[in-house]
Image (cartoon, grey):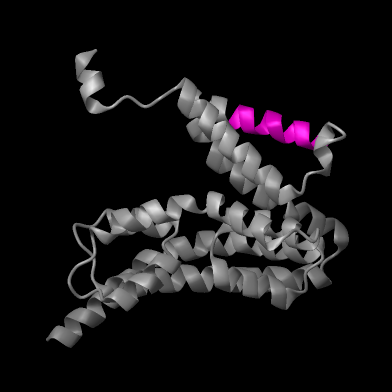
């Protein structure tokens, strides 16, 4: 009876992950094209996706690697870009039931993406079997999409490859614009980061800074300035007002 229940939870996780898988496939397809058109070989692009499962981190890492950036630069940029995953993992750990072992937590954390976290957090509690099913399909979709995009980039006309390569930037626009329209603080932070990025691109002496450090500097400074100007008030302060 227990085996049947475990199997049921596993397949429920797979079903819940199918929609995430389909979304990841399209995004990772664009990443595969972007990576190969930037100078990587298909196998390198596939290994990056299989070992990371982070769209923003991977997109930022490719220019750093191809420009000969240092390991420190690469590590710091990835740490800052992916810092939110550690917070999501801490939150998700409160939902895991007693069937989840310590070794399982490492595997779950590896593929605890925004969408996986959102689906799992909607449950009262989640089992080891459910989480394994939930993370399986998104991982396959992300890796398979990258593989197909990477190999397709070698056979499609250059003009089509260039057009499809823009899709991954469209994804980030779609992520940023809605919350920025609804919250002026987010809009300020995004605008500040964009302005600083333009300075590093067009000001002669700033343009010499490696792309990885540009990501680090712009993201940290924009977040720090926004936090200083628009601090989030605690519950006690809100009630006091």
Magenta-highlighted residues: 190-201
**Vertical comparison of 188 with 78: above or below:** above
Q: How many marks?
A: 0
Q: Which residue sits at x=23%, y=27%?
A: 235
Query: Residue 179: x and y, percent?
Result: 48, 33
- Magenta span includes 158: no
Q: Quadrant of residue 117?
A: bottom left
Magenta residues, dominant SS class: helix
**Vertical comparison of 1 with 188: above or below:** below
Query: Residue 140: x and y, percent?
Result: 51, 74
Q: Is residue 183 visible?
A: no
Looking at the picture, tell me which residue is in the foreground, 204 or 27: 204
Q: Which residue sits at x=64%, y=40%?
A: 217
Looking at the picture, tell me which residue is in the foreground, 206 or 6: 206
**Vertical comparison of 228 with 39: above or below:** above
Q: Quadrant of the C terminus?
A: top left
Side of 204 relative to 164 (left or right): right
Q: Which residue sits at x=75%, y=32%?
A: 198
Q: Is residue 81 visible?
A: yes
Side of 168 relative to 175 (left or right): right
Query: Residue 77: x and y, percent?
Result: 61, 52
* Residue that extends furthest to the left in the rendered view of this protein: 1
* Residue that extends furthest to the top in the rendered view of this protein: 241
Q: Which residue sits at x=42%, y=74%?
A: 136
Looking at the picture, tell me which residue is in the foreground, 233 or 150: 233
Q: Quadrant of the N terminus?
A: bottom left
Query: Residue 194: x and y, percent?
Result: 67, 32
Side of 205 relative to 31 (left or right): right
């Amino acid at each position: 009876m227990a085996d049947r229940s475990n199997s049921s939870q596993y397949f429920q996780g797979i079903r819940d992950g199918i929609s995430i898988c389909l979304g990841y496939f399209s995004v990772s397809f664009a990443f595969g094209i972007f990576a190969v058109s930037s100078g990587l070989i298909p196998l390198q692009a596939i290994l990056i996706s299989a070992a990371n499962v982070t769209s923003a981190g991977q997109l930022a890492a490719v220019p750093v690697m191809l420009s000969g950036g240092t390991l420190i630069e690469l590590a710091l940029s990835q740490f800052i870009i992916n810092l939110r995953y550690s917070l999501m993992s801490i939150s998700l750990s409160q939902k895991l039931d007693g069937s989840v072992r310590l070794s399982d937590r490492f595997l779950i954390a590896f593929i605890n993406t925004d969408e996986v976290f959102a689906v799992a957090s909607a449950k009262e509690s989640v089992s080891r079997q459910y989480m394994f099913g939930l993370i399986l399909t998104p991982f396959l979709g992300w890796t398979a999409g990258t593989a197909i995009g990477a190999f397709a980039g070698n056979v499609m006309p250059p003009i089509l490859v260039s057009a499809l390569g823009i899709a991954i930037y469209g994804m980030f626009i779609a992520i940023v614009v809605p919350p920025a329209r609804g919250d002026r603080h987010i809009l300020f932070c995004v605008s500040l980061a964009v302005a600083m990025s333009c300075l590093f691109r067009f000001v002669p002496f700033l343009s010499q800074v490696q792309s990885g450090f540009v990501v680090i500097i712009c993201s940290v400074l924009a977040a720090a300035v926004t936090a200083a100007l628009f601090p989030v008030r605690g519950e006690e302060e809100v009630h006091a007002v």
